[in-house]
Image (cartoon, rainbow, N blue to C red):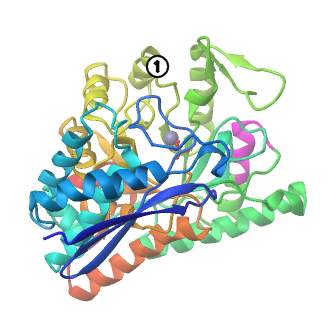
């Protein structure tokens, strides 16, 4: 039985307000904190903000907090639904209570906080870890497969103040043998990258962006990748660490063209065909294994064309917004072969799991993701383990809200091994970990 549901306005990693929810059952009180994006997809579920310019610059979430306490709490408590056994019904109730297609009534931030806290309380009520609860919810099989962490070590786009148009350049230790070793390798490359950046651009260039990666004064993707080549080679990891890019290209797509200098007063407009050629040349010259949002959310033709001719993992973020409707459409159009899973894009845990399962049914991969505005909540570490998605991105191995997820994954690995459970590492199989 749910005894009470309380909410509060707290801060995220960018210093903006976010929603915190506490669900109390007999076992105790279980908390969730909601993340928030900057390069958001147009079709994401709506994050309710107060829009009062004099308070937190309009970004307050007091309305969402009130929706939790005054609208959701009485109905959910009265419903008699039980955490642990009724997560799907709880999430369906939240969706129905909102009544809109994009959760604009109660706010996806209000709804997700309740959904996450109920899942956490549910796991505790059954005396199982959250990842095991989520595994059962999703119907995923054992053994557990720990994910390859994709560390975003160079920040650009709307996540940093440099001129780099591409938002994220990531390193992925696919050649590690465990998540613990992968984190060590990622951290070593990150620390070496700092030295490479400082040597090349001076100490002021060691400042970091929203996701903990460095943001040196570079503007071209090959400059970012060259820095990674150097740092991984210096560490002796050239064969075991691969690269990935999320240009987050919806951010610089205007009038049918991609402006690679969108953060400057000049412009460098590329047609989709020219951008495609740029990607092909990068893929030829660097060990890139994954590309996310290479084209804008409404540039479907480019996605389909590119997907025909490339064989690396092509991930839809803004394109799919963790929503079965767009996952289905992308499969019909053969636009990509992987879904980015961001829980706040859709607003309930059950719907996020449904989107992942639909993606799996098309033989796609699923890539779990944090948001650029994060919290210390480590929920997604349990999702990636429970759903066996084989890889996740949670920023650089730096900043508390980023490392909270990596630390939790190492805890899970230690716990599983101590229990004698089979616990594999996805490694080079990261795209098909759910089938191992
Ligand atoms: P966001 O960035 O959280 O600002 O949307 C992450 C991403 O684009 O993958
Ligand atoms: Zn993205």
Question: In the image, residue 321 lies at what x, y percent?
Answer: 38, 36
Residue 254 located left or right of residue 85: right
Reply above or below: 395 against 315. Answer: below
Q: Residue at x 22, y 58 (%)?
A: 74
The residue at the far top in this view is 255
Which residue is more in the foreground, 355 or 260?
355
Categorize mark 1 by other alpha carbons within 10 Å: few (<14), some (14-19), many (20+).
some
Question: In the image, residue 306 lies at what x, y percent?
Answer: 46, 22
Q: Residue at x 40, y 25 (%)?
A: 307
Which residue is more in the foreground, 311 or 300?
300
Q: Secondary structure at mark 1?
A: loop
Image: magenta residue range: 218-227
| Res 341 seen here | no
Q: Which SS does the magenta portion mostly show?
A: helix
Which residue is more in the foreground, 137 or 165?
137
Reply above or below: 23 against 334. Answer: below
| Res 365 seen here | yes
């Amino acid at each position: 039985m749910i005894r009470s549901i309380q909410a509060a306005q707290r801060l995220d990693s960018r210093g903006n307000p976010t929603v915190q929810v506490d669900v109390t059952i007999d076992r105790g009180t279980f908390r969730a904190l909601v993340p928030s994006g900057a390069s958001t997809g147009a079709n994401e579920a709506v994050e309710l903000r107060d829009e009062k310019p004099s308070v937190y610059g309009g970004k307050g979430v007091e309305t969402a907090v009130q929706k939790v306490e005054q609208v959701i709490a009485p109905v959910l408590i009265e419903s008699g639904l039980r955490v642990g056994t009724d997560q799907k019904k709880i999430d369906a109730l939240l969706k129905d209570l909102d009544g809109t297609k994009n959760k604009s009534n109660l706010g996806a931030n209000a709804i997700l906080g309740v959904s996450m806290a109920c899942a956490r309380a549910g796991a505790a009520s059954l005396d199982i870890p959250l990842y095991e609860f989520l595994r059962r919810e999703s119907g995923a099989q054992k053994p557990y497969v720990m994910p390859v962490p994709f560390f975003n070590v160079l920040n650009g786009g709307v996540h940093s103040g440099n001129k780099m148009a591409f938002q994220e350049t990531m390193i992925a230790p696919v050649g590690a043998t465990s998540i613990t070793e992968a984190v060590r390798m990622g951290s070593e490359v990150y620390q070496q990258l700092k030295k490479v950046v400082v040597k090349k651009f001076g100490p002021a260039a060691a400042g970091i962006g929203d996701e903990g990666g460095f943001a040196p004064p570079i503007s071209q993707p090959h400059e970012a990748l060259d820095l990674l080549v150097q740092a991984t080679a210096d560490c002796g990891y050239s064969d075991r660490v691969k690269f990935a890019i999320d240009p987050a290209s919806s951010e610089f797509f205007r009038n049918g063209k991609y402006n690679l200098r969108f953060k400057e007063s000049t412009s460098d407009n590329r047609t989709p065909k020219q951008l495609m050629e740029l990607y092909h040349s990068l893929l030829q010259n660097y060990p890139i294994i994954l590309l996310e949002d290479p084209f804008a959310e409404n540039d479907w033709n480019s996605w389909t064309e590119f997907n025909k001719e490339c064989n690396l993992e092509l991930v839809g973020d803004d394109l799919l917004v963790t929503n079965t409707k767009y996952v289905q459409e992308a499969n019909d159009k053969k636009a990509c072969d992987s879904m980015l899973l961001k829980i706040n894009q859709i607003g309930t845990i059950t719907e996020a799991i449904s989107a992942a399962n639909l993606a799996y049914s098309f033989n796609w991969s699923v890539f779990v993701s944090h948001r650029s505005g994060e919290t210390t909540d480590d929920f997604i570490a349990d999702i990636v383990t429970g759903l066996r998605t084989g890889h996740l991105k949670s920023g650089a191995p730096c900043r508390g809200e980023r490392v909270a997820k990596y630390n939790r994954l190492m805890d899970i690995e230690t716990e599983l091994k101590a229990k004698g459970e089979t616990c594999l590492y996805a490694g080079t199989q990261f795209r098909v970990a759910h089938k191992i």
